[in-house]
Structure formats: C-alpha cells, structure tokens
C-alpha cells in the first residue's frame, strides 16, 4: 500500500485527454464570489488532494463537478463531456434533470456527514442505486454489495442500520455505496472531518486501497499525512483561486507561496 | 494512570446489588386516594342513576340502522376521506415545495381555501349548493366541448358522459369527497412539514447517485418524512372519525350520530342514545390508536433501538455467515 507514492503522476497523465478538465470556473452565492477562475486537469488514475483553509472554495469546486452546484462561468468536462451544458446549433443549452442525473451516475461522491439513508440497512444502501437507477437485478446487486462490504471491511454488517454503526463504519458503507455504481471518478468531500480521531484511520485505509486499484480520486481533505502519502498531486486553494499545485512532496514539503506556508504551518501546529 | 485502577479490575467477585431504601413518594399515595374516591363516586352514580340507561344504550348500539350508519357513515366515510385526504394532501404539500411558481401558488391557494372554511359549511354547500349551481355535470373530450360544438354548428354537443349532481349530492360518495377535500388541506401542511424535516444531505446523496427527482421523493425523502407525518396523521384520522357526524348536514342519513339521535328522539331515550354513540366513537378511536402504534413502529425503521424482530433477523444472518 505504501507503494502508492512511487507511482508517477505523469504516467497516467500523458495518455490522452484528462478525465476532468476545468477551465476558468466561476461560482458566486448571492453576489459573493467563491470560485474566481479555477483551472484544473485530473487524469485517469490520478489521486488529487485539494487543500486550503475553510472558505477557500475547495468543497464548492468539488460539488460543481457533479452539479450539486451549477457554475456561473467557465467550463467543466468529465470524460470529454461538457458538464451541465450542451452545445446545439452553435448555442449552449442547460441540461435537463434527467441528463444531469445521467452524468452524475459516472461520478461517485462521499460526503463529510456520510448521508447514508437511515431507513435502509447497510446492504440496502449499497443496493439502492444499482437496482433503482441502473436497473440491475436484485440478486446480482446483492452479490456485488456484499463484495463491496467485504472490500471496506464490513462483511459482518449487512443488516445493520446506519444508526447502529460508528462514524467510521458509516463512512466506509458510504464509500461502498458510491462504488456500487462503478464510477469513473470518485469525489471525497472532507470524508474524515466528522469522525472521532481514532476512526479516521480505518476510512483513510479504505481510501488508500481504493487509490491503489487505480481509481481516479479528487479528495478535499485536511489529512496532510494522507495527502503526502497517497496523492499524486496536491492543489492548494485559497480565496477561490488555485495558489499552488504540484507533487505532494513539493507542495507540502517545500511550499513556494507565502499563503501555502502559513496554512501548512497552522495545520502542523 | 493510578495503579489502583489496575488492581480493582482484577477482582473476580462481583459486588451484590446495592441494598438501599428507595425514595419515598407520598404525593403519589395522596393522588391515588383522591382519584379512587372520585372514581367510586362516578361509578356509584352510574349504578344508582337509572337515567343513564346503559342496558338501553347497549341495545341501541346493536340496532341495525345504527350499525349501518356506523359502517357506512362513520367507518367507510373515515377510510375513504382519509385516503383522498392523504394522497391529495401529499400531492398538494409537494406542490407547495415545488420550484415551479405556478404549482407552488396553486398549492398555497388550495390550502388557504379548504383550511379556511368550516367543514360543516363545506358539507352543507356540497349537499345543496353544488346541485343548485350545476344540476348536471357533462364530461366531454375537450375543454369547452359544448361551446366548441355550438360554435362549429355540430348537431352533437360532444358530451361523452353526464352525471346528475342532484341525485349524487346527498350520497355517501359526496360526503367522502367533501371531507377528503377538506382533510387534504391539513394533510398538505403535515406532509410539507415532514418533507422539510428530512436532512437536505439525503437529497444530495441520492442526486449524487444519479437518482431522478421523482425517485428521490418516493424512495428517499417520503419514507423518512413518514416518520414525522404519521403521528399527526393518526390524530387527523381520529378527528375525522368524529367529523363524519357532520355528514348529517349533507344530508346523509346512514350516519352513526344521525341514527342514534333518531332512535333517541323517537323512543324518548335521549341519554342512552348519546351513550350508544359515545361508546361506538370510543371503540373506533381505540382500534385506530393500536393501528397507529404499528405504523409508527414500521416507519421508525433505522431510528432509535431496533425492534426485537429486526435484531433476531440480523443475528440469524450473522450466524449463517459464520458457518461457512
């Protein structure tokens, strides 16, 4: 697992177009501009960590990728497909609800507060989308869900309701739920921030092994250790812009910008 | 940190249960005495005052017209109007929360109108007013079919189906529709509150999985909202049992209170007839309360402690898993 750091970020990056391309992305909430022109490429198989102080726009950017927020300016492409928009007859059209839902199916998302469905068991949570969105047969979905539970180390908990699981266990079920749709890309929005310190490790371990399988991941996190060990690239954001980016060792170990330095100093303090 | 804690942990003999006197509650005994005396007085008056006429009340309860009134005017009317009320109410509640301003306004107007007029007035109006305004209801294939046919000079006025409202107006069906329309306004507010009580993160998680809006509502939001919706809906159902007595204003004669009252005035046994109606209403509401308990348990799934049945199921599954 520790070999993750040795894989070069460029090997995946050089093969063809990026999986995610963001160009000059802008987003404002009620006149308050949160994203002020974000450019970012993420290639297939890459693990990118977004770092930055709260309010820097990293979570908002992540939510824009799967359209939980719609962007005001700029463009985002996922797997070559324009996100939320469509060009027809030389004019842009916003996508309807069904098309947006179809685009989201390719992208898995893990939330800070897990957001498991509390009225369903762990197994039912994982089976829900394959059965009711993709139309996979129940027995097939169940077999796959049990495999995923084993993958996240919870093969003994299929019948547990979220309220009967610890935070770390809930987050691992949430990761399994997202993986059940076989996404091309996984987004993690501060997946360990709501956890008790002793439960953080079990979730990071699952994320590490997921990275080792070659999954493309964009992770908003405050876990410097995870970023240093697992991320191919680290992007430091502040005030709605990308301040600095590069290999994790360089950005965290030898930051070039004053803002990055002060942030990292506060994180280590 | 202290070595003492390590020491105590190695004790193998459990201490016995604490032997201490419980706290005294003299107030409870006083209250019990007062209530016991009052209850004795009440029971004694039941037994000694012949005007209650419990035996006669029991007889009235079993009269055929009373039983028919109970079945049709009370039970069927309650079930029917609550089905209309809940389904229409959830729809109106969802409309009010819609992003579509037209739907949201219609939802608001519906609630405003039907919550604003007393049920008695609504029932009386449906019984006589509507039949007076629209004695015949003609259903055509298009809106304004009759006007269109006239304008085009057709010999046929395009009516496919017509309903004699005057005949229909004092039927049980009309009463069910009236109570259902009124109930939907209250249920809309209850449903809206229930939907709003669901964590917005639930919707986001479902969206992120690629679910469509309708599916998110049906599979994720409503099942969780039900937990909040059911207790007040139970309340509404019990209130509805009692409000079916308003159907006599339709006028509908196959209705419990109308029938017991009729027996009472005809035989001059006013009080026993009231007792008979009261007893039936209490019996029905008691049964409903039992039903509500089971519904609440069903929709409380995943919240709080698991039920014994769920725990057993989980354990059986675990046992099966550990065998291979």
Image (spheres, helix red, strand yellow):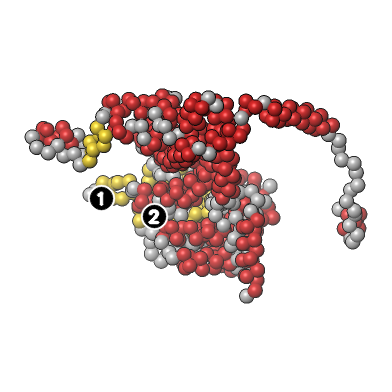
The chain ID associated with circle 1 is A
Give the label, 1 or 2, closer to the camera: 2
The chain ID associated with circle 2 is A
Outermost residue toward the front?
A: B267
Vertical comparison of A167 with B84: above or below = below
At which x and y percent is residue B63?
A: 50, 37
Q: Quadrant of the C terminus of chain B?
A: bottom right
- Residue B294 seen: yes
User: Residue, x 69% and y 55% (percent of image)?
Assistant: A198
Q: Assign a secondary structure to mark 1.
A: strand
Q: Is residue B303 left or right of residue B260?
A: right
Residue sitting nearer the eye, A131 or A264: A131
- Residue B186 seen: no
Quick one: label 2, few (<14), some, or many (20+) residues within 10 Å?
many
User: Residue, x 31% and y 50% (percent of image)?
Assistant: A86
Number of the label disc, if any, that sits on residue A246: none
Outermost residue toward the bottom?
A: B324
Residue contact at pointers 1 and 2, CB within 8 angstroms: no
Q: Is residue B270 left or right of residue B140?
A: right
Looking at the rendering, which quadrant does residue A162 occupy? bottom right
Residue sitting nearer the eye, A171 or A89: A171
Q: Kindly report the distance in space between the C-alpha atoms of the residues bearing marks 1 and 2.
A: 18 Å
Q: Assign a secondary structure to mark 2.
A: helix
The residue beneath circle 1 is A88
At which x and y percent is residue A164?
A: 64, 54
At which x and y percent is residue B3?
A: 90, 56
Count of numbered labels shown in the rendering: 2
At which x and y percent is residue A61?
A: 47, 47
User: Residue, x 32% and y 25% (percent of image)?
Assistant: B129
The residue beneath circle 2 is A103
User: Residue, x 90% and y 53% (percent of image)?
Assistant: B16
């Amino acid at each position: 697992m520790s070999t993750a750091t040795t894989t070069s970020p460029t090997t995946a990056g050089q093969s063809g177009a990026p999986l995610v391309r963001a160009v000059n992305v802008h987003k404002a909430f009620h006149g308050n501009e949160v994203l002020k022109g974000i450019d970012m490429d993420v290639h297939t198989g890459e693990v990118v960590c977004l770092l930055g102080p709260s309010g820097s726009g990293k979570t908002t950017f992540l939510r824009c990728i799967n359209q939980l927020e719609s962007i005001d300016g700029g463009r985002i492409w996922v797997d070559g497909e324009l996100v939320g928009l469509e060009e027809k007859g030389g004019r842009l059209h916003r996508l309807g609800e069904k098309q947006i839902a179809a685009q989201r199916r390719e992208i898995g998302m893990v939330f800070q507060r897990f957001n498991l469905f509390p009225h369903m068991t762990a197994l039912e949570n994982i089976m829900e989308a394959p059965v009711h969105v993709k139309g996979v047969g129940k027995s097939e979905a169940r077999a796959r869900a049990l495999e995923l539970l084993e993958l996240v180390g919870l093969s003994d908990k299929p019948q547990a309701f979220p309220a009967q699981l610890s935070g770390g266990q809930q987050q691992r079920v949430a990761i399994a739920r997202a993986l059940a749709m076989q996404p091309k890309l996984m987004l993690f929005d501060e997946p360990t921030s709501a956890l008790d310190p002793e439960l953080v490790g079990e979730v990071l371990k699952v994320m590490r092994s997921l990275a080792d399988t070659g999954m493309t991941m964009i992770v908003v996190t405050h876990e410097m250790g995870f970023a240093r060990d697992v991320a191919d690239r680290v992007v430091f954001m502040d005030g709605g812009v990308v301040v600095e980016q590069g290999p994790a060792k360089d950005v965290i170990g030898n930051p070039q910008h004053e803002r990055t330095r002060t942030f990292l100093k506060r994180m280590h303090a | 940190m202290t070595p003492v804690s390590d020491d105590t942990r190695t004790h193998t003999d459990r201490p016995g249960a604490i032997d201490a006197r419980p706290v005294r509650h003299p107030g409870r005994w006083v209250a019990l005495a007062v209530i016991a005396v009052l209850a004795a007085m009440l029971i004694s008056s039941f037994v000694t005052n012949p005007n209650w006429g419990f035996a006669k009340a029991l007889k009235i309860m079993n009269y055929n017209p009373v039983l028919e009134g109970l079945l049709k005017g009370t039970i069927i009317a309650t079930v029917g109007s609550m089905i209309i009320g809940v389904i229409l109410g959830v729809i109106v509640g969802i409309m009010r929360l819609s992003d579509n301003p037209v739907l949201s306004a219609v939802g608001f107007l519906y609630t405003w109108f039907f919550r604003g007029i007393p049920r008695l007035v609504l029932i009386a109006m449906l019984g006589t007013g509507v039949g007076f305004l629209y004695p015949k209801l003609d259903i055509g294939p298009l809106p304004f079919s009759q006007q269109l046919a006239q304008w085009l000079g057709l010999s046929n006025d395009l009516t496919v189906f017509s309903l004699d409202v005057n005949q229909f107006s004092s039927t049980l069906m009309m009463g069910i529709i009236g109570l259902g329309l009124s109930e939907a306004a209250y249920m809309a507010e209850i449903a809206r509150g229930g939907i709003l009580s669901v964590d917005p993160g639930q919707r986001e998680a479902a969206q992120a999985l690629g679910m469509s809006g309708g599916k998110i509502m049906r599979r994720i939001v409503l099942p969780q909202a039900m937990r909040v919706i059911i207790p007040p809906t139970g309340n509404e159902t019990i209130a509805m049992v009692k409000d079916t007595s308003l159907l006599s204003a339709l006028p509908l004669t196959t209705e419990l209170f109308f029938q017991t009252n009729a027996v009472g005035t005809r035989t001059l046994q006013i009080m026993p007839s009231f007792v008979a109606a009261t007893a039936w209403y209490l019996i029905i509401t008691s049964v409903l309360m039992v039903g509500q308990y089971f519904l609440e348990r069903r929709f409380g799934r995943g919240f709080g402690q698991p039920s014994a049945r769920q725990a057993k199921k989980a354990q059986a599954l675990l046992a099966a898993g550990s065998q291979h």
